[in-house]
Image (cartoon, rainbow, N blue to C red):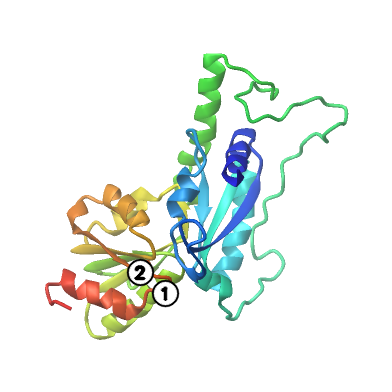
Amino acid sequence: LKQEAIGYACMAEIPCVIVNVQRGGPSTGNPTHVSQGDINQARWGTHGDHAIIALTASNHQDVFEVTVNAFNLAETYRTPVLLMFDEVIGHMREKLVLPGEGELEIVGRLPMSDFGAEHRYNVTGLFHDMWGFPANNPKVVNELLRHLVDKIDNNVHTITRYKEYYMEGAEYVLVSYGSSARSAIDLAKNRRAKGEKIGVLELQSLWPFPAELIKDKCSEAKAVLVVEMNMGQVMAQVKAAVRNPDRVFLANRIDGHLITPTDIKRIFRVIQGKGV
């Protein structure tokens, strides 16, 4: 039922921000333990063709800024925006520096007529004409659906957020997000100190998926290792984006515990042909 409401917000172009602090599933699953298993749900959870914006972050400073950005994007594109955090981020405590007034961009809501005032308009989850009234004319349906999808998919580059660490000359790229990215960054830092050229691409926007960014940043890598706590939901998107999908691998945990740098190192050594 909650997913139906997201679909309604997409169709009616209602700006809103929805926070999903992910934990183990499906069903009641592992309710107090970490997971990143809702990434595909964010994109495909509601029925019908639609586009969606989903963001995430790996530390509290970024959580604050990404949340502000989520509201900005919701207002700009008149769409629901999902914040896909995880249990570790939700329960973690760390320093947050509040930005000063004017340091972060704030997008105001476009002027709208007050409901029940002098202008008559209608809000519906049905396909509708420019006045908001239901319409099943094929031309109207086609144009509205293309508008709902194109307004987001045509602005992937504007919406995309990411961070990169140790990427200069990287022979191996770790693609990660959320709390998993913290372990990936720690591993890359330690291995760089030992002369191994490992970089990290931390995704902060998951949908629309930044395929061109992935293709560009991973183009020179010997291998790409996707670090996440699910069965490979972002890995599937990375494989579809790169030129050589056979060199994309998965480092994951699905047991309710945070993936560690040691977990990633074991998979990385296998990729390098050094065993475990």
Residue 151 locus on image (x, y percent): 53, 37
Q: Position of residue 65 (x, y in %)?
A: 59, 64
Q: Residue at x 60, y 24 (%)?
A: 127
Determine the CA span between mark 2 and mark 1.
Answer: 7 Å
Residue 182's place in the image compared with 45, above or below, is below
Say above or below: 111 vs 57: above
Question: Front-most of 29 and 250?
Answer: 29
What is the quadrant of the C terminus in the image? Answer: bottom left
| Badge 1 amino acid | Leu
Inspect this view and state whether residue 158 appears.
no
Residue 218 seen in the figure: yes
Q: How many neighbours does mark 1 have within 10 angstroms: few (below 14), some (14-19), or many (20 or more)?
A: many
**In the image, residue 135 above or below residue 259:** above
Q: Position of residue 240 (x, y in %)?
A: 28, 47
Q: How many labels sit on residues?
A: 2
Instruction: State the image coordinates of residue 245 (x, y, percent, origin top left).
Output: 21, 52
Give the farthest residue toward the left: 273
What residue is pinned by disc 2?
253
Occupied quadrant, residue 182:
bottom left
- Residue 71 numbered tag: none
Question: In the picture shown, does residue 148 fall above or below 133?
Answer: below
Residue at 56% from the left image edge and 77% from the top image edge: 92
The secondary structure type at the circle numbered 1 is loop
- Residue at mark 1: 258
Q: Is 80 on the left-hand or right-hand side of 235? A: right
Residue drawn at 29 percent across, 70 percent down: 168
Q: Are marks 2 and 1 in contact (CB under 8 Å)?
A: yes
Q: Secondary structure at mark 2?
A: loop
Q: Amino acid at mark 2?
A: Arg
User: Which quadrant holds the N terminus?
Assistant: top right
**In this image, 146 relative to 265: left or right?**
right
